[in-house]
Amino acid sequence: MSPEFRSRGIVALIFDFDGTLAVPTLDFAHMKREARKVIARFCPVPEAAVPTMELLDIVEAAHPDLAEAIRPAVLQRVREVEVEAAARSSLFPYVRPMLAACRTFGLQTGIITRNCPEAITRVFPDIAEHFPCIVTRDDVPRVKPDPEHLLAALEQLGVSPEETLMIGDHPMDIVVGQRAGTFTAGLATGEASLEELRSRTPDYCEASGEALMRRLGIFS
Ligand SMILES: [Mg+2]
């Protein structure tokens, strides 16, 4: 590891999944359209420009009597969209060598994702052998950027925020790390450009996972 990275005392790396460990194939606009079609079967669809899970929260707040029927119906369609997208995805080439290097350095690894377990397992069938800690949206009441999502992972690993690096491709991944009190790294391998990620002032910002691993001295 590089002297700079070693001096931070980081013992755990927590990764986002899509766009960070795996080629991003999820079409969020398509997912939202599909979710809206399902919601429209029950009630008028709000016009809010928010992600699907947050849209569901708004619908439930407006129609609490329908919540028990709407949520499972929307989540079922969302899962179908996610699993379809996962079939077209694959792991980035740096991931398996990085996991081997982390074991050598005694670094712990975990994943927090707003995706479902079926989709990430489809992309990475032996994921549980490599990541002792995987926290999907099914495992927490509120997903990132709520810090509880990340803190749940840290609790599982038994590490503190001050000794953790949160790595992701979306500004939300940097925000969740900053809210939880971890170090943060942005990777421009997903939806956001280097400039967008830099504007959130992460501790590290690189064009790829491979570049980050070289910067940290995890890859020589
Ligand atoms: Mg992502």
Image (cartoon, rainbow, N blue to C red):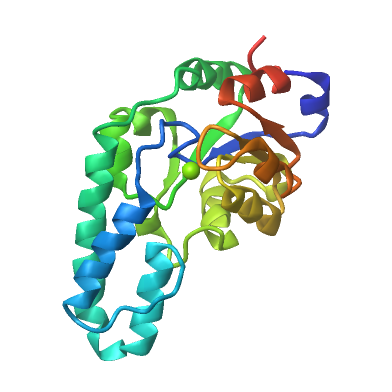
x, y percent for residue 187: 60, 34
Q: Is residue 72 visible to us here?
A: no
Above or below: residue 16 compared with residue 46: above
- Please tell me which residue lies in front, 90 or 125: 90
x, y percent for residue 2: 77, 19
Q: Which quadrant of the figure has residue 139?
A: bottom left
Above or below: residue 144 compared with residue 70: above
- Please tell me which residue lies in front, 42 or 9: 42
Above or below: residue 201 compared with residue 3: below
Q: Residue at x 34, y 80 (%)?
A: 59
Q: Residue at x 52, y 58 (%)?
A: 144
**Total marks drawn?**
0
x, y percent for residue 94: 50, 18
Q: Residue furthest top?
A: 220
* Quadrant of the image containing the C terminus: top right
x, y percent for residue 78: 26, 57
* Quadrant of the image containing the N terminus: top right
Q: Which quadrant of the figure has residue 193?
A: top right
Above or below: residue 188 compared with residue 36: above
Q: Is residue 206 visible to us here?
A: yes
Q: Residue at x 28, y 47 (%)?
A: 82
111 lies left or right of 30? right
Q: Which quadrant of the figure has residue 131?
A: top left
Q: Residue at x 70, y 48 (%)?
A: 182
